[in-house]
Image: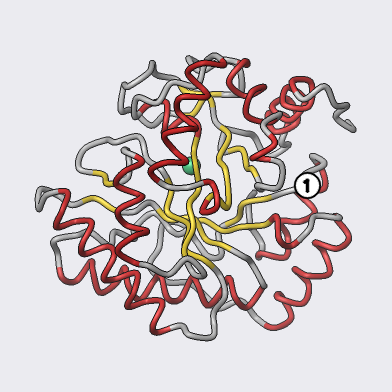
Amino acid sequence: MSIAGGVDKAPARGAAVHSTAMQIFVKNNNRWDGPPISDAQAKAFAAELKKARIPLEHVFAHTCYLINLASTKPDIVEKSVNALQDELERCEQIGLPGIVMHPGSHLGAGLEAGIRQIAELCQKVIARTPKVKTRILLETVAGQGTNIGAEFGEIGALLKQINNPARMGVCMDTCHIFAAGYDIRDADSYAKTMKEFDREIGFKNLKAMHLNDSKHPLASRKDRHEHIGKGYIGEEAFRLLITDPRMANIPMSLETDKDEDLTEDRENLATLYRLAKAKYPA
Ligand SMILES: [Zn+2]
């Protein structure tokens, strides 16, 4: 949900589409730095969330797109570490339980070296923020280029090396896992994929979900989100997912294209409510 005008403006936008969960940025998503969140904004954010009746524990952040902890360029690594620390502190300031981050791109250095570097730098940022409770949520990715985290085993290896379950977690993105080759389109493939997720990552580490359909077929390794039920994944996968008791308390967010009037959010939410056999309030 957009934070144009300040983070405290997001809850009312959520309320306008009857959100019960929300993902936000905590600063401009295409810049290394930004103005701090003022105390007044933080207070207003809490008050607005309450008014919107969105539980704080269902609100999570996404890091800016420039961060790459696996970069081979020292200046980018330094900027990434500092930006991640800053964003974690912003999340803590407004009480968010987690911030979603793409693990990173190794740019040719190799998977193993990339995983080692991301793990070490996560540990470094965690050590620098001992009072912060916000978790870093590693997102499953589609596997474009040298991106790390398309295989569940890669995320599992990162969690194992970082070895700090209190400060780490995972965000599963339906479009990304499908693009990475994990089928979820019917009961059998869904069960198989979730079993593998549980084995390699563990449901206890799942702290957030991104619900997106895919503009490209299974295993395309292309990250292009489509509206729910309108892409190659289709409605059945989303029905299976939102009626899966293991997902009952996992906050979920759409990341699909929308206009400022949020019509597409309402349509996608209405589809999800219909699939859950529940009534969308609008
Ligand atoms: Zn996502």
Q: Secondary structure at mark 1?
A: loop
- What is the x, y in percent for residue 37? 61, 76
Q: Residue at x 19, y 71 (%)?
A: 75
- What is the x, y in percent for residue 172? 49, 42
Graded by Cα atoms within 10 Å as few (under 14), some (14 to 19) or many (20 or more), the crowding at tag 1 reads some
Q: How many marks?
A: 1
Q: Spot the residue most to the left.
A: 109
Where on the picture, by quarter, is residue 85? bottom left
User: Relative to residue 193, is residue 146 depicted above or below?
Assistant: below
Amino acid type, mark 1: Thr
- What is the x, y in percent for residue 123? 34, 74
Where on the picture, by quarter, is residue 199? top left
Q: Is residue 45 left or right of residue 118?
A: right
Q: Residue at x 41, y 77 (%)?
A: 126
Q: Is residue 228 left or right of residue 177?
A: right
**Residue beneath label 1, please?**
20
Where on the picture, by quarter, is residue 25? bottom right
**Relative to the observer, which residue lies in front, 193 or 180?**
193
Protein image colouring: secondary structure
Q: Residue at x 37, y 40 (%)?
A: 141
Q: Is residue 90 left or right of residue 8?
A: left
Specify the quadrant that holds the C terminus: top right
